[in-house]
Amino acid sequence: MAKELKDLTKRSEDYSRWYNELVVKADLAEQSAVRGCMVIKPYGYAIWEKMQSELDRMFKETGHQNAYFPLLIPKSFLSREAEHVEGFAKECAVVTHHRLKTNPDGTGVVVDPDAKLEEELIIRPTSETIIWNTYRNWITSYRDLPILINQWANVMRWEMRTRLFLRTAEFLWQEGHTAHATREEAEAEAVRMLEVYNDFAHRFMAVPVIKGVKSANERFAGALETYTIEAMMQDGKALQSGTSHFLGQNFAKAFDVKFINKDNQSEYVWATSWGVSTRLMGALIMAHSDDNGLVLPPHLAPIQCVIIPVYKNSEQLAEINKVVEPIIKEMRALGLSVKYDNAENKRPGFKFADYELKGVPVRLAIGARDIENGTVELMRRDTLEKQIEPLEGIAKFVKDLLEDIQDNIYQKALKHRQEMTREVNSYEEFKVEIEKGGFLMCHWDGTPETEEKIKNETKATIRCIPLEGDKTPGKCMVTGKPSKQRVIFARNY
């Protein structure tokens, strides 16, 4: 393990390589036999489960229910909403046959040409079409509204260039799909779910994000408005970390979903959709981790505290076990996730390095001398600082320390973002500053043409039009035309 840590590429040398190595070495995920798809290993999945659990609770607190819809979508469904099909057409995986048969010569199997589907099926890249076709059967009156549904599922988007968690052909996510009687209700829902994502990123991921609206060029295919939370990674690149879409009546019209309103008139339903994915795992890794491995915020760490015995013989281990047992019970009674690693097949030094690599927030080491002194050695993962603390009351001390670590990790990420956010007033300055990374606050004339020009020449995109902060109008840095407010440009993952 010590050699693995030594071999971990430093962020300053090659940030991309550091990330790829860390995902594998920390036992989060690995490449699979299927091109562009990953295997999420137990430790990585445990982090995702904690994310999923907290988000699911937050969704249900806002009145949403979970349901499940088919993985396969008739190809004709996608063509009903023009912008939607155009946005996803190049990423769709298509099922054309439903059976294989053995080769006549006995060498493997081939697709049975007699088993061709009457209509080809798309492996869902997102579920708006299949869900709105279903909602048509559920909605007849205003009394049936609102419908507040969330789905936990996997989706397939045939990405050409993939990276574990950040961009894979298949990934896990949740997708909310809601139906409303009025435009105002739907717009309020889209904003409400953006706030849920913002709250989750802040309180659980310890990632400061900026709330904003996407430009028309970056908007979700088929949406009238896309709200987003944008996070900054340690290398200064942006990562879109959650989106919420006001869909208007586009999908209701495409699938003829109408209802009788309170005035006994027929009208189309108003819609939203919103989602976050396992991309949040990438955000968690890149926002906080260091050259020694993962740094996990305690609120999402599968193991919040690990206790490691240091001993010379079985008698010492037995004595340590007796002392540790009530401490573990007390920690668990306080709601902490604690692991006592007294396995005898690995040395303490190996265990120290392993849990440091995996980002466990607090490590306690206890030996025979510690028991004599009534103390324990504690190390906090965020700062790598070691300290000696009394065994008496250690459970409560760790619980309080975990909250301090959570806040410290957030404040460190916030400070980094603030230091890497600058105002830029000319296009020439922009071309220089964008090479340094970070968020550039610039005036833009609001046209897709200017946005496309900047993207083509600098590889930077408008991450969002911020909902909060300075709204002072100005002049576009490229054209000199009027600008309503500064927007955030950055290179992104």
Image: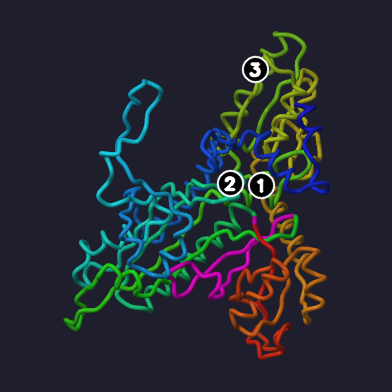
- The N terminus lies in which quarter of the figure? top right
Q: How is the image coloured?
A: rainbow
Q: Amino acid at mark 2?
A: Phe
Q: Which residues are magenta?
A: 207-234
Secondary structure under badge 3? loop
**Occupied quadrant, residue 420:** bottom right
Q: Can you give x and y, in whole percent of width and height, for residue 51 in the image?
A: 52, 47
Tag shown at residue 165: 2
Secondary structure under badge 2? loop
Q: Is residue 134 above or below residue 304?
A: below
The residue pinned by badge 1 equals 285
- The C terminus lies in which quarter of the figure? bottom right
Q: CA distance from mark 3 to mark 2?
A: 31 Å
Q: Can you give x and y, in whole percent of width and height, for residue 83 in the image?
A: 42, 70
347 or 2, which lies in front? 2
Magenta region includes residue 264: no
Q: Which residue shows up at 64% across the image and 42% down it? A: 399
Sequence-earlier tag: 3 or 2: 2
Task: From the viewer's perspective, tell me whether residue 148 is left or right of residue 267.
Answer: right
Magenta region includes residue 227: yes
Residue most toward the left?
264
Q: Amino acid at mark 3?
A: Ala
Secondary structure under badge 1? helix
Q: CA distance from mark 2 to mark 1?
A: 10 Å
| Label 2 close to label 1 by CB (< 8 Å) | yes
**Occupied quadrant, residue 341:** top right
431 or 284, which lies in front? 431
The residue pinned by badge 3 equals 343
Q: Is residue 295 above or below residue 306?
A: below
239 or 306, which lies in front? 239
